[in-house]
Amino acid sequence: MKNIQKLLPGILLSLLLALTANQLQKIIPGHLISAGVFALLLGMVINPFISGNKNFSGGVQFTSKKILKFSIVLMGLGLSFSQIFSVGKFSLVVMSFTLASAFLGGYLLGKVMGLPWKLSSLISAGTGICGGSAIAAIAPVIEAEDAHIAYGISATFLFDILMVILFPIMGRFFQMSDLGFGLWSGTAVNDTSSVVAAAYAFSDAAGQYAVIVKLTRTLSIVPVVLIFSYIHARVESKKTASQGPVHARNKVDLKSIFPFFILFFLLMVGIKSTGLVPDAVSSQITSFSKLLMVMSLGAIGLKTNFSEVTKSGFKPMIHGFLISLLVVVVSFLVQLMMGQI
């Protein structure tokens, strides 16, 4: 009970931020800014007032780490393996190209711009997969700094706001079909709320298709998290080796670095795939998982000092913009070559 009492103030503050952020999201027309972004920014505003306060630190830390992983696990109940097959081979092909573009392009651009590889990777994940959710999933396995998480989410959401406005205009200019536009927005726009806003602004049919594509795209979190957990372990192993004799280098212990929460995520997807969970129930659980995710992002904001974020300058924003633009162009070109436009 004493441990719970120590955690409670920080958890309740994070919950308050999440509830406030959800209300702010509803005020903005078209949900242009997601609740997660609002929670993160509000947390950063409050940070100077609670920094160093032990009454909040434990619960904020617990929310940003444990509840974050739990929210990702619950998110699996909103997906099913059958969705992969329902979207067809075309969307999987397009997603393969956009993911490769985001991570390869992000890595090379990050090297050129001199960005830390963790920050560059988070921006690429947010751009290539699903915005804040992907950033939040990868951050724990690479032990990313809170400032990098905040910057990664900020870099992707600014581009999303622009795309929500421009995507329907460009879709009509290119005379895209509902199917083509749904595939384009579902693979090229980052955050789920932004995908919904952009696609439904084009047509209801495009919106329905885009949501399915976006949910399927979310499944790529699994292999990406596994890959980055291994990369991080290799980097740390090399650091250890550089501090001592060459023979001191240790092999990477896969069991010790394996992000087991991702197995529970897959378990939830498997349960959803059986059809045993009614859609109404899975919908409620998914909504709850989104609330927990927003809480976690609010907690990350509470741990993040704004001055630390600004030290990175404008380079991460430029990096995020260029990678997002690359994904948009690659998605369009691949569909064009496949005759989907």
Image: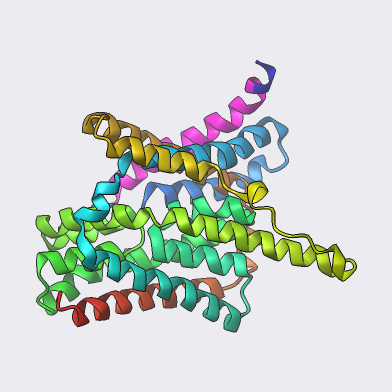
For the point 29% across and 56% down, the residue is 214
Left or right of 234 in this view: 14: left
Residue at the spot 64% in from the left edge and 70% down from the top edge: 116
16 drawn magenta: yes
**Which image quadrant for residue 306?**
bottom right
The residue lying furthest to the top in this view is: 1
> Image quadrant of residue 329?
bottom left
Q: Position of residue 283 (x, y in %)?
A: 27, 35
Q: What colour scheme has been applied to the protein in the rendered image?
A: rainbow
Quadrant of the image occupied by residue 275: top left
- The residue depicted at 86 percent of the width and 70 percent of the height is 246
Q: Nearer the viewer, residue 281 or 46?
A: 281
Q: Quadrant of the N terminus?
A: top right
Residue 207 in the image: x percent, y percent? 17, 56
Residue 195 shows up from this direction: yes
Considering only vertical position in the picture, is 254 above or below 238? above
Left or right of 68? Residue 214 is left
Name the residue: 72% across, 33% down. 54
Q: Main secondary structure of the magenta part?
A: helix
In the image, 251 versus 341, the foreground residue is 251
Residue at the far right: name it.
245
Q: Position of residue 112 (x, y in %)?
A: 58, 84
Q: Which residues are magenta?
A: 4-28
Q: Is residue 273 magenta?
A: no
Quadrant into which the C terminus falls: bottom left
Q: Is residue 252 above or below residue 90?
A: above
Q: Is residue 290 visible?
A: no
Residue 170 image offset from top left, x and y in percent: 19, 75
